[in-house]
Structures are given as C-alpha cells and as structure tokens.
Image: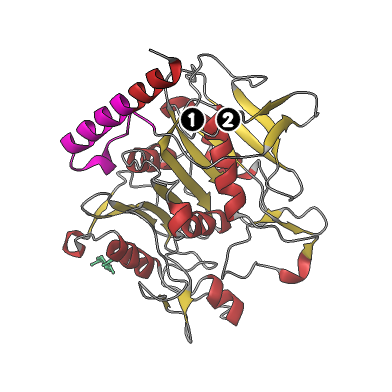
Amino acid sequence: MPLPTFFAYVLVLASLLISVEAAKIPSSARRPALSCSSSSSSSSSSSSSSNGESSWTSSSSSSCGQCTGGLPGTLTYGRNLLEFQYEDQPKRQHILYLPKSYDGSTLLPTVLGLHYSSGNIDSIDAMAKLSDLAERHNFVWIAPQGGVTFKNNQGYAWNIPFVPTTDDSNIEGPVLEDRKYLVALLQHVQSNLCVNTAQSYAMGHSGGGRMSSSLVCNPEMSQHFAGIVASSSLQAGPSAGPDYAAPLAVGQANACNPSHPIGIVALHGLADQTNPYDGTPEDGTEDNKKRWGYSVQSALAHWAELNSCDLSSNNTVEATTATDGPIIHRQTINCPDVDITAWLQDDLPHAYFDINRADFNPGDHWWDAISKFSHEPQY
Ligand SMILES: *[C@@H]1O[C@H](CO)[C@@H](O)[C@H](O)[C@H]1NC(C)=O
C-alpha cells in the first residue's frame, strides 16, 4: 500500500490498541502508560550548549518522545548545561540530567526540579541530590532558572501569578513569564528525548514548590503533569482575602483548577517560620500573607476536594524508627485516582529534609510516592 495509507493504518491500529488498553485498566492514573500519543502543540525553540557551538533542535511536533536509540546529538550522560529560548524571551540556562540507564529506547519519567527563591539551576540538585536519585530510580531531570532576577548575583525566583516575590525592591531587569516557559521547556525535552509524556512531575523547595503547585492549578498546564512534590511550600491556588487563611474556593475566579486528579506529595517542617505549617508567617505583612496565608492542612484538604478524595481515610503514622532523630510523620489521604501523601517532620525549620538520615531518605520516599501516578496529556 502507499506510504500515507500505511501510516494511517498504523495510527488507527495504535489508537485501537490504546483504547482497548485503557478499557482494561479502570484506574489508569496509577499505571505508567506505555504508549504515547501525538500532540498538536509544537515548539519553535531550540537549545544549544552554553558554548554555542553545538545544538540540538526540535525537529518534530510530537510529544511522544524520540526513541531512536542511544543519546541524541551532543548530549552526554549526567549533567548537560543547555540553553532554551521561549518566544522572544532572552535565552535561559538549564541543566538537563540523563541517567546512565537512558538508552534511547526505554521511555523514562521526567522531573522538573525547581529551585527556591534566590537559588539557581544548581540549587535543587545540591539540596535534594536529584542526580543520585535519577541514577537510582531511572528518571531524567531538568533544572531551569526562574524568570525573576535579583540584583548583585543574589540568584533567581519564579514569577508565580498571584504570589508576590520575596523582595520586590531587589529585582533587576524584566520579570519573565515562567509557567509557559516551563511547559515549553518540558515539551522541548519530550520532543527530543525518549521520555514518557505520561510521567512528568514538578518538584521544588519553597518558591520552587509554590511554582510546582501553581503549574498544576492551571487547567491547560496541569495536563503536562501527573503529580507534584512540594517541599516546605504546598499550595492549592491563591489564598482568599481578607485574612488569606484559606485557598480560593473551588470554582471561584483564579482558584486552583486542575484538568485531572493530581498526585500530591508534600514535605514540611513543623517548625517552619517562613511558610508556617499552621499558616500566616510571624511577619504577617500583606505580601507575606498573600505568599503564605493558609496552613498545610488547608492545602491538603483543598487538594483532597479537587481530587475527590475520601477525607475519612486521612491517617497519620510515624515514618521513622530512629530514637535519636526528630520524628517524621507520614500522612496519607486516599483518593480514587491518585493519593495524597505528606511527610511532616518535628522541629524542622524552613528546610529540605536531612538527606543523610539513615532511617529516612527523603528522595527515595517522595519518588516512590509520586512515580505511581501517570497522566497522558489530552489536547
Ligand atoms: C487529618 O487528620 C489530622 C489529625 O487528626 C488533622 O489534624 C488534619 O487536619 C486532617 N487533615 C485533613 C486534610 O483533613
């Protein structure tokens, strides 16, 4: 048969197989999808290595991953320092990390690792040891740079709608659109690498976790993520005035409005003074309350509502065994498609969990919790 007919035939066959597969698995959100669908979105952007000599450019509008075997173009295993341009924004650097298990034929999950305010592209790997986790658990990670630049090399922050930055007077240059940038960067990676579009997760600490939360509160952007991991920063949309003690109610303008159930993992210190567990920082200025108004439990309850969870399943147990370290509690809420997990550590200030603790490796725990979830973007 002629080539176009052959491709149409293969497409029909593939979609038939996909629908049969979907019909067999009622709770498809818990299973990694093995197939990937083509996408109508396209990226006109390109990346090049930071010395500008070599480049790898998106040649396809498919979001299906490019599984051509081996490593594409000029990329290496481990850390690649790359640049990506979104529309007419200035180019920005990011790190793209490929684990040794990347073979160009197995679709790997992707983690978008988002730094804290005043951090940079190195911060989240330094803090959460994403490189070690990626080798242990076989995922690709991307660490981009926020679109808010602080003066005097004091790092970057994320431009999160409805959330004031930590230090407005200290900003230099233009504040760039970040959420669309992050989705475009993710799609760029998906169209160049052998990654599973149904297993993309955003994780971050503080401002990075707030940004992760914001990405999945937008109906279009949430399509690209199966779940998030928020360290010291879980949000469920903007807080409602006048006291900012609760998220905007479901259905209100600008309220959190994900397109599908979102896997939620939170880590939080019970002695956090910056984003206090019980809400409202000590320095309760208007900006601080807008940035962190409601409690971690309010955020979890709101996600439970959005994910149609069974709140009577809300349960907390001790997750640590050592008697010489602070207790970490594990809270779970069961939901039809995804679950909600929060790890809460006694005495911990505004910080990531201890990565050297023998009886609790935070990364292994959040990866196990989040990687169960998958969502194939629907356009
Ligand atoms: C879950 O239960 C704990 C302990 O009973 C309670 O403090 C918390 O507010 C509950 N969380 C939600 C989201 O219902």
**Is 29 a magenta residue?**
yes
Q: Secondary structure at mark 1?
A: helix
Amino acid type at mark 2: Tyr
Image location of residue 319, percent across then percent down: 29, 47
Q: Tell me if mark 1 has few (under 14), some (14-19) or many (20+) residues whose alpha carbon lies within 10 angstroms of its own.
A: many
Q: Tell me if mark 2 has few (under 14), some (14-19) or many (20+) residues whose alpha carbon lies within 10 angstroms of its own.
A: many
Is residue 137 at least partly visible in the picture?
Answer: yes
Q: Is residue 66 above or below residue 170?
A: above
Image quadrant holding the N terminus, namely top left
What is the total number of numbered labels drawn onto the structure image? 2
| Residue ID for mark 2 | 97
Amino acid type at mark 1: Ala
Distance between the Cα atoms at labels 2 and 1? 8 Å
In this rendered view, identify the residue nearer to me: 170 or 364.
170
Part of the protein shown in magenta: 12-36
Is residue 114 at least partly visible in the picture?
Answer: no
Which of the four quarters of the rendered structure image does ligand 1 lie in? bottom left
